[in-house]
Amino acid sequence: MGTMQSIGPNDPRLSGAATDRKTSRTALWATVIGMAVLVLIFVFAIIQAANESSVLGWILAAIAGGWLAIAVYVLFMVRGTLRFGREAVARMEGEMRGASGRAPAAASSASEGDSVRDQKIAHSFQIVLVQAKVLSEELEKGPEADREVVDRSIDTINLTAKNGMGMVRSDGPISGTVVD
């Protein structure tokens, strides 16, 4: 069995940017050489067709010109795609740098922490209101009221009130006006 070989740079001192620049330079030279060969073939085909005045020579010149046109089109499409890719990578790197060190839902200030606590308390009040409505509907039925539904509503109200009081008590003293 053969040994495994690295597909990256063998020199650990080369960073990703240096490797990218080296790869880009190699690709640029390969493109320049390929385009130069196509231009030479096209020019040679035109010169031969003009010297021999044959239809076949002009057909070959047209084919060489077509290949040259396709190569130029592909070159510009690839360059546009690479530019778009570089911009997208730069944009994502900027977003990642801006978001580093933060949890997505972390509260960054005391007011946001208070807001979360207020939402939890508001949700507790909504639960109490819903259960109070269920309780009053059951009690309106009189003797036909389902005792299990009544007990479950009372238990839910008690549990929710205890949780809400725990949230309020853990935050320090309460200030406000008592309304009779």
Image: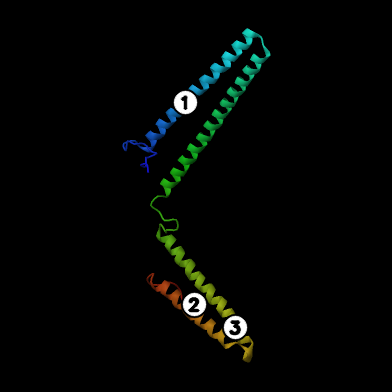
Query: Which quadrant is home to the N terminus?
Result: top left
Which residue lies most toward the top here? 51
- How far is mark 2 from mark 1, CA to CA? 84 Å
Tag nearer the camera, 1 or 3: 1
Disc 3: which residue: 136
Q: Earlier in the sequence, mark 2 or mark 3?
A: 3
Disc 1: which residue: 30
x 55%, y 78%: residue: 131
Q: Relative to the observer, which residue lies in front, 91 or 120?
A: 91
- How far is mark 2 from mark 3, CA to CA? 24 Å
Relative height, residue 138 to residue 119 (above, below): below
The answer to whether the residue labelled 1 contacts the one labelled 3, judged by CB atoms less than 8 Å apart, is no
Which element carries disc 1, helix, strand or loop? helix
Which element carries disc 2, helix, strand or loop? loop
Image position, residue 49 (x, y; %): 63, 12
Which residue lies most toward the front here? 1
Amino acid type shown at disc 1? Ala
Relative height, residue 46 to residue 97 (above, below): above
- How far is mark 1 from mark 3, CA to CA? 83 Å
x 67%, y 11%: residue: 54
Image position, residue 111 (x, y; %): 43, 60
Disc 2: which residue: 179
Tag nearer the camera, 2 or 1: 1
